[in-house]
Image: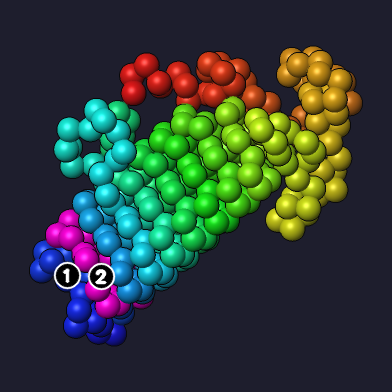
Amino acid sequence: MSVKIAASAVVDPRAQLDPGVQIGHFCVIGPGVRIGRGTTVGNHVTLCGNTTIGEGNRIFPGAVIGAEPQDLSYRGTDTRVEIGDGNIIREYVTINRASEKEQGVTSIGHNNFLMSHVHLGHDVRVGDRVTMANNVMVGGHVHIGNDITIAGGVGVNQFSSIGSMSFVSAMSKVLHDVPPFMVVDGIPARPRCVNAIGLKRNGYSEEDVRVLQSAFRLLYKQMVGAEVARERLLETGPIRPVLRQLFDFMDESCSGRHGRSRDKRRKAA
């Protein structure tokens, strides 16, 4: 498969384009960019900085990937963006490269769907199979797990973490960590119920859903706290892996300030 580059595109000769890559009209591709096999880049896309994009991605018009972090302390270090395979990045998505304050990488995994006008700030890490609807705004240093849906217009505070298999309702304001397996909603966003539909769609058992619902009632209805909830659930039998994942996540969240585990890094960042 040959590389196809539109006549009006500006591609630095040092950029690395694998077979089957297609570059649309009026794109600008910088010298530090590497694009994997079969990725298509639509018209008017800008790829800059030290940016690596995997195979089979689809990048739509107007996206800007790899621009400098929006951080006044940034001093031009050669930080990077790394994107996996099979992602869909729709119109006018912006993904900033990392600051110098953590590992120097903004990363996106595989098979994610970023709808139009999504913004991912510096040092963000996104797992696999995450859907972000239009106008989601993710601040710097946020970590997002796997199999998550974030609905339109959500704002995510910097240093927050969003647990796997969660659902964030539209227009929510995420100030604290979002526990795995939960639906959160509101300003500020709070857990409202277990993400039962998402769990069932992803092959979790009825028993997994049942024990998570029991945990939800203890944690967010009766408000007994994580330690008491854990003890009461232990009385009913061995802790299932989904509960262990939930409580481990909550322990981490409680160890940081403001219900954000990653706030432990804020002083250094």
Residue 26: in magenta span: yes
Residue visible at 57% across and 29% down in the picture: 175
In contact (CB < 8 Å): disc 2 and disc 1: yes
In depth, the one of 233 and 57 nearer the eye is 57
Q: Element under label 1?
A: strand
**Highlighted magenta segment, given as a residue range:** 23-39
In depth, the one of 196 and 117 nearer the eye is 117
In depth, the one of 45 and 261 nearer the eye is 45
Alpha-carbon neighbours of circle 2 within 10 Å: few (<14), some, or many (≥20)?
Answer: many
Q: Is 137 above or below relative to 101? A: below
Report if residue 112 is visible in the image.
no
In depth, the one of 217 and 55 nearer the eye is 217
The numbered dot on residue 64 is none
Report if residue 22 is visible in the image.
yes
Q: Position of residue 38 (x, y in %)?
A: 35, 75
Q: Is 3 above or below relative to 54? A: below
Q: Position of residue 125 (x, y in %)?
A: 43, 42
Q: Which residue is mark 1?
A: 11
Residue visible at 74% across and 58% down in the picture: 201
Q: Which residue is mark 2?
A: 27
Residue visible at 59% across and 27% down in the picture: 176
Instruction: Indicate the quadrant where residue 240 lies.
Output: top right
Kindly report the distance in space between the C-alpha atoms of the residues bearing marks 2 and 1.
8 Å
Q: Is 251 above or below relative to 169? A: above
